[in-house]
Image (spheres, grey):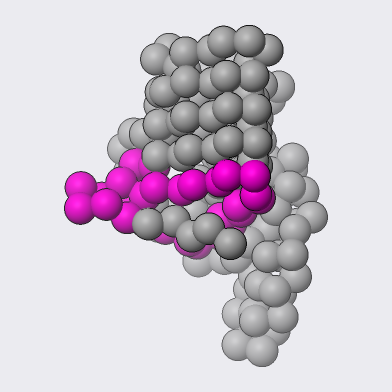
Amino acid sequence: MTTPSTSADGIVRIPARQTVVKKLGHWTTARAFEIRAHRGVVVLDLRSPRIPAGDVRVAVDADHARLTLLVPDDATIDDWDLHRSGRSRVGDPERPEVTAGRRIVLSGALRHAEIRIRRGGLAVLTAMFSREYWGDLRRAHREGRPPSVADPAHSD
C-alpha cells in the first residue's frame, strides 16, 4: 500500500498508482497536497479543524483516476488553474450559494479523470462506508472517545 510522504517544503505527496488510498479523519495538519493518480482512487478528508486557517492547495496529476475531496459545508472550490482533457470533470453538486469558509485551490491536470466534491451528509456517508471508519469506531470505543472519521469537526 502506498503511504503519503511530506517533502521538505511541507507538501504532503500522495501517490495512487492502480490502488485505492483513503485519508480520513484527523490525518494531517498540512495545507498543501500533491496527488499523482494513475488508474487509482484517492479520498482526502479536508474537514478537520486541526488543519490551520487559510487556503488549502491541492496539486493534481490524474490519469484515468478519481479524486474525492471531503470538504466543509461552506468551503469554496477554486478550480481555475486545473487543466482538463478528455472526459474530465469536477463535480460539486452541493456547491453553496454564499461561501465564507475555507478556500480550496485545485491546480494541475486531469486526463480522463474526475474530482468529486462531497459536503455535509454525503461527506459523512462517504467516510462511513470505509474500512477506516470501522477501525476508528473500535479504537474510539476502547479509548472512550468519540470517533473522528465520520465527522472530524464534531470529535474535538
Residue 67 position, x and y percent, is 60, 35
Query: Residue at point 79% right, 55% down?
Result: 129
- Asked if residue 46 is positioned above or below residue 133 in the image, the reply reads above
Query: Residue at point 20% right, 53% down?
Result: 8
Q: Is residue 19 magenta?
A: yes
Query: Residue at point 66% right, 72% down?
Result: 136
Q: Nearer the viewer, residue 4 or 117?
A: 4
What segment carries the magenta color?
6-33
> Is any atom of residue 100 visible in this view?
no
Q: Is residue 65 left or right of residue 72?
A: right
Residue 56 position, x and y percent, is 37, 37
- Asked if residue 64 is positioned above or below residue 4 in the image, the reply reads above
Residue 134 position, x and y percent, is 75, 70
Q: Nearer the viewer, residue 150 or 131?
A: 131
Q: Is residue 129 left or right of residue 155?
A: right
Would you identify the image quadrant in which residue 101 lies?
top left
